[in-house]
Image: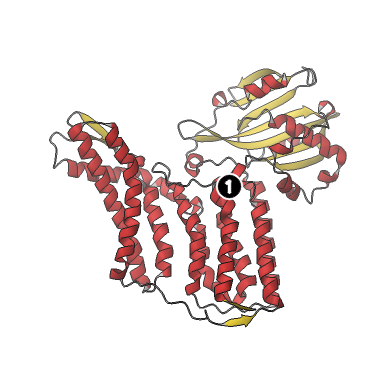
Amino acid sequence: MFYDKRKGIVIFTILVTVALLNSFFITPLTISDSDFSTYIIVPLMLLPLLALFTLKERIIPDVRKRDLLTGAAVFALLVLITIYLRVNLSYLFTSLHIDMLLFPMMIAALAIPLFGVRNISRFKVLSVYALFASPVVLLWLSSVNSGFVIGNTLVIYGIVGHIFHNVGYTAPITITANSYSVGIGSTCVGIGVLVGIVMFLVPVAYLYDGRLSRKALWVASGFALVLGLNILRMLGIAIAWFAYGPSNAILTIHLFAGVLLFYLSIIIMLLLSGRFGLRFPAEGKGGKARIRMGGVYKAGIALAIAFTIIYFMLSSDYPSVSIISPLVLYNQVGFNASNINPVSGAAVNQSGLGEVAIQNNEENNLYIELTNSTFNASAPIAMLVMPKSSGETAALLRNSTLLGSMTFLGNAGNVQTVYMVASAGRSLLLYAETIPYVFPNGTSTVASIYAVLPANRTSSGIRCYQSYDVPYTALINALNPDAYNATANSRIIGAYCIVRRLVSR
């Protein structure tokens, strides 16, 4: 049996596709006009195709035993960094798709045992492209989006002024004519579609043969085409709106025209590629070099498959996490305790807990006492909701003796820590979590939530495995001796399960 570049690339493409599945499942399948960060679905979908396009590269597999060790070392480092960042970034890890910022390491971990270290440079385009599947790379566009919207509004206003009389402009985005008004908002401009067309054309440009300058011009022309067609879309809607008045038909056309123009632009640019001196490539050199499938190559394939299975399992909780738009996280407002309701009324009623809430307006904190037959007035569950503070947990633990702790990765993607402490002659359990609180108007704030429970009243028999990712939590606590202490472990898990029923998402 022989091994060559073509077999290796097919295997590589399949493994890349499997590794991306869980990230794909948590990504919206359409590009939203109002949330440009949704463009990331395009690079996510095209990454496997771009992996297949590396067939054009000059690759002659050259795998040696030390390459297997190098690939294993890269993958081990990727796993450690992923665990570390998931704990430290909590909900930000999945909402910002930090996994895709790390994906170049996964590409290297697969490519090295399949093709050898000497060929790793052949995958640099794929690695750089993977970074754009994280909205973090282009999040800065949110700061220029309003200016872009205003610029488009002024363009439409200037053109409409030559068609209708008594046209008026009200800053920043409103145009009036014939007693009708139309707002050119972010849902009209669709900056995500503009980014999406670039993300689509880049892999195709990579596949084509031609000078780099001609490829860049082709991609830039695709961007300009979408921009121009989008202006025509807005202009057509504005003219119809002012001429015939608002109607559901116009709104329907507005809703679907953006998607149609996106696909039309792709077709036009593919048809015009020859005019830019781009042509479909012949197979890259090295494609016919065949190597006998020895033990090292078989081991490399087996290792790459094993890496993919492990990576898939590490990300298997992604479909259950709560994803928050990066734009909502970016659009933060100040914490206000009067607007926060961290306790689910249904959970409180079902648990038979009485609630006494005290808001401290001066410190902008919310203090809540919860009682029932077990946690009475002299030993209640005490909850504190406050603005995020990096030093608050340390302050709460300062005058206590730490008896143990465990960190949990909740099913929603948030990280929680429960500490068992001795304070003033009593044994207490402290639950700590930082969560984003999203408001209906598209803004958010960040709240730190703490809960204190008396350890002697917290049942050690409570279990709630459905509330957190058990395998990942085990990995996080693998080097934590408290995870293996039956007494501390049972009390900590009991406290965790009780509070998890109270904290709303």
Q: What residue is shown at x 81% (from left), y 28% (from top)?
A: 458
Q: How many marks?
A: 1
| Residue at image mark 1 | 94
Q: What residue is shown at x 58% (from left), y 22% (from top)?
A: 361
Q: What residue is shown at x 57% (from left), y 61% (from top)?
A: 16
Tag 1: amino acid = Thr
Label 1: state its secondary structure.
helix
Q: Is residue 399 visible?
A: no
* Above or below: residue 314 compared with residue 51: above
In the displayed structure image, the side of residue 362 where residue 295 appears, left or right: right
Where, by quadrant of the figure, is residue 108 drawn? bottom right
Residue 481 vs residue 393, the one in the foreground = 481
Where, by quadrant of the figure, is residue 488 drawn? top right
The quadrant of the image that shows the N terminus is: bottom right
In the displayed structure image, the side of residue 214 where residue 404 appears, left or right: right
Residue 68 spot, x, y in % from top left = 69, 72
Q: Is residue 95 visible?
A: yes
